[in-house]
Image: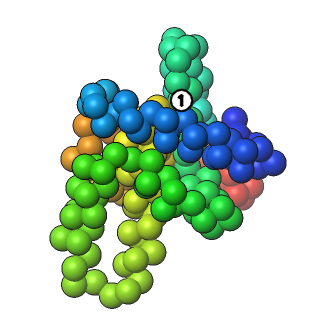
Amino acid sequence: MSNPIKESTLERWIQNQMKVWESEKKVIEKEDLPRPFITISRQYGCFANSIAEAIAKSLNELQHTDKWITYDKNLINKIEEQYNISEKIVETIDTKKREEMSELWRTMLADLPPQAAVFQKLANTIRALAIHGNAILVGRGLVIITKGLRFGLHLRFVAPLQYRIQKVMEIQKI
C-alpha cells in the first residue's frame, strides 16, 4: 500500500486529524457545509488503489485547503485494530448525524447475531470518515455503508474478464 500516510506517522496523523474534526464539529453543527467524499468499488482484478491515489493527488493540486486522503481496507482496519479509535472518530460527528447513524444500524442489524457488531463498528468508522469529507474510500460495499450521505460520488470499476485475469496473474506473478 503506497499511502501518503506512513505507518510510523499514522498515530500522530490520526491524533491531529481528530483535533481538527473536533474543532470543526462546532462549525458543522451550525452550518451543513458540503463535505465531499468518493467511494470506489471494483470487480475482482480491477485494482483501484493507484487510481484512487491519483485522484487524491489531482484534487490536492486543485484544492489547497483540506487534504484528500485515500482510505483502503488495510488502512481502515489498521485504524480500528491498532489504535482502537472508531468510537473517537464517530464522536467527532455532530449529534444529529450520530443519531441518524445509530438509527440506521438499529434498523438494519436488529435481527442479526452479535457478530454484526463488528460490521457496525467498521461501518461507523467508514461513515464517519465520509461525513468528515475529503475522503476517497476504496473497497466493496461502501456504496451501501455510505447510503443516504450527501455530497458523495460513487464509482464502480469494471473491466473485461481477460483483462482482470491478466492483472491478477501479474500481481500474483503467475
The residue identified by callout 1 is 68
Q: Residue at x 56, y 44 (%)?
A: 18
The crowd level at tag 1 (other Cα within 10 Å; few <14, some 14-19, many 20+) is many
Residue 161 seen in this snapshot: no
**Quadrant of residue 150 within the rendered picture:** top left
Q: Please state which amino acid type lies under the numbered disc 1.
A: Trp
Colour approach in the figure: rainbow
Q: Residue furthest right?
A: 8
Which residue occupies the extreme bottom position in the image? 113
Residue 5 visible, this angle: yes
Q: Is residue 83 left or right of residue 68?
A: right
In this picture, is 123 found above or below 71? below
Image x and y of residue 38, in percent: 40, 36
Which residue sits at x=69%, y=35%? 4
Q: Residue at x 44, y 67 (%)?
A: 121
- The answer to whether 82 is drawn above or below residue 167 in the figure is below
